[in-house]
Image (cartoon, helix red, strand yellow):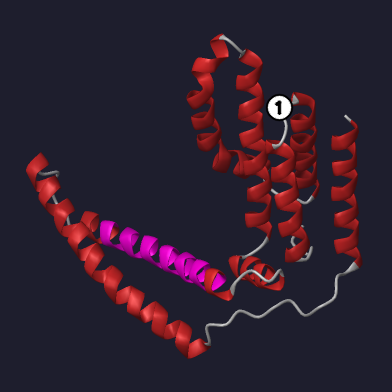
Amino acid sequence: MHAVDARIKLVATIIFIVLAVSTFNLEKVLLVLVFLIVLSAVSGLSLKRIAGRIWLFTFFSFIVVFPISFSNPMYLVTFTMRVATSLVAIQMLVMTTNFAEICSALRSFRVPEVFVSALWLAYRYAVLMFRELLSILLARESRRVSKGSHMDVWRKGGEAVGLFFLRSFEKAEKVQLAMEARGESLNHYQGKLKMLDFIYATIVAFTVFWWVVI
């Protein structure tokens, strides 16, 4: 999966999501889900890690539609499986493709450069700011010698939030300057598709065929 072209994986992910959400036939949804699980296992991806990433959103979707189960229990199962299948497809893409390759694949499909650049900037900025927030919290906890009262917790928390916002403005400027210094444009894929890409595309097409037949 890691060696498959990002363009093929991006299109395949979209196809899997469309197949999962465009039907309420439980057999069709399970077909796509089982295929994704088998493909993940064969590719060496950790099924435990995938389950750890998707269980919260899957459980949330289960809770949202739970009231409907009293009148239509099959809808509850099908809807939850649809969400789980879509999330597995997305995680397969995320775990085997870095974000720069995804953005380059989007540009290869003529997605507007403004949109892709904004998406790329938001991703890098979000990762950087989460690291900054973690460092602030770790620094705060390492300097605290006593548990303190609830008021102290609120006061120190407010100071941490204020510091976080100040650093966010500084980091935003640094990220923008770094992007301008290195060049903001994303390169398109220039290489030709490999045999492995055609094999993966054939497998996806075979899955679509069986989805239609069922």
Note whether 165 is above or below 23 in the view shown: below
Count of numbered tags = 1
The residue that appears at 69% across and 44% down in the rendered structure is 17
Taking depth in this image into account, of 82 and 41 the one nearest to the observer is 82
Magenta range: 116-137
What kind of secondary structure does the magenta stretch mostly adopt?
helix
Whether residue 154 can be seen here: yes
Q: Secondary structure at mark 1?
A: loop
57 inside magenta stretch:
no
The x and y percentages for residue 194 are 88, 69
Whether residue 146 can be seen here: no
The x and y percentages for residue 79 are 62, 28
In this rendering, would 149 be left or right of 7? left
Taking depth in this image into account, of 167 and 102 the one nearest to the observer is 102
The residue that appears at 40% across and 85% down in the rendered structure is 177
Note whether 88 is above or below 189 in the view shown: above
Q: Residue furthest top?
A: 70
Taking depth in this image into account, of 122 and 92 the one nearest to the observer is 122
